[in-house]
Amino acid sequence: MVLLGLILVLLAGGAVALVVTEESSRYILFGNTYQLDHVQMFLAGAVVAAALLAGIWLIGAGSRRTARKRRRLRAVRAEASDRVSRLEDEKRDLERRLERDRNRAAHDGGTDGRVAHERVASERAAHEPVDGDRLVAGGRPDDTRP
C-alpha cells in the first residue's frame, strides 16, 4: 500500500512539474502533443489532485497497518518472554525443592531416605509437563523421556 501511494504521489508531482515547466498550454507527453483549454486543464488538475490525495491516504493507511502489526508482534513477543520467565522461575523453584528434599533424605538416612526419595519422585511425576506443555518447554510431542 505504501509503495502504491508513493507511486501515485510521484506521478502527481511529475504532472505538476510538467505543467509548471511548460510556457504555453501545449504539452508534449510520450510523443503526443496535447493542447488543453481552460476546462480541460481544470479537470486534469482535479485528477492530479485526486491522485495526490489518494497517494497520501495510501501511504498513511499502510503506515498505520504496519505500526499495528509491529505493536501486535511486540505484545506477542513480550507475552512469550513472560511465559518463558515464569517457566524458568518454576524450574528453579522445583530444583531448589528437589535439592532440599535430597539433602533431608541424606541427612535422615535409612528408611526415611527411601520415603523421601519416593516423595520426590511422586512430586516430579506430578509436575511432569503434559503433551501441550512439552512444546512450550522445547520438547517434541512424541518425546517420551521422563
Image: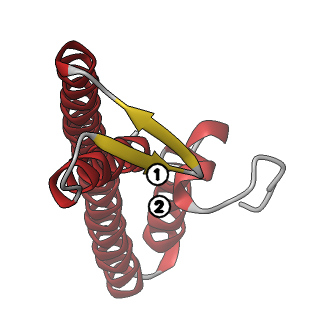
Residue 139 in view, yes or no: yes
Tag 2–tag 1 contact (CB < 8 Å): yes
In the rendering, at what x and y percent does residue 79 appear?
27, 48
Rendered residue at 20%/13% (across/down): 39
Q: How crowded is mark 2: few (under 14 residues within 10 Å), some or many (20 or more)?
A: some
Q: Which of 95 and 53 is in front in this view?
A: 53
Rendered residue at 61%/38% (across/down): 132
In the rendering, at what x and y percent does residue 90 appear?
30, 60
Amino acid type, label 1: Glu
Residue 73 in view, yes or no: no
Using the image, determine if residue 114 lies above or below residue 22. below
Q: Which of 15 and 141 is in front in this view?
A: 15
Q: Nearer the viewer, residue 138 or 93?
A: 138
Amino acid type, label 2: Val
Rendered residue at 31%/54% (across/down): 14
Residue under numbered circle 1:
123
In the rendering, at what x and y percent does residue 117 appear?
51, 67
Residue under numbered circle 2:
120
In the rendering, at what x and y percent does residue 55 appear?
28, 37
Rendered residue at 62%/50% (across/down): 135
The colour mode here is: secondary structure
Q: Is mark 1 on a helix, strand or loop?
A: helix
Left or right of residue 52, residue 29 in this image: right
Left or right of residue 37, residue 114 in this image: right
Left or right of residue 92, residue 56 in this image: left
- Which label is found at residue 36? none
Using the image, determine if residue 56 lies above or below residue 16. above
Q: Residues within 10 Å of mark 1 (few under 14, many from 20)?
A: some
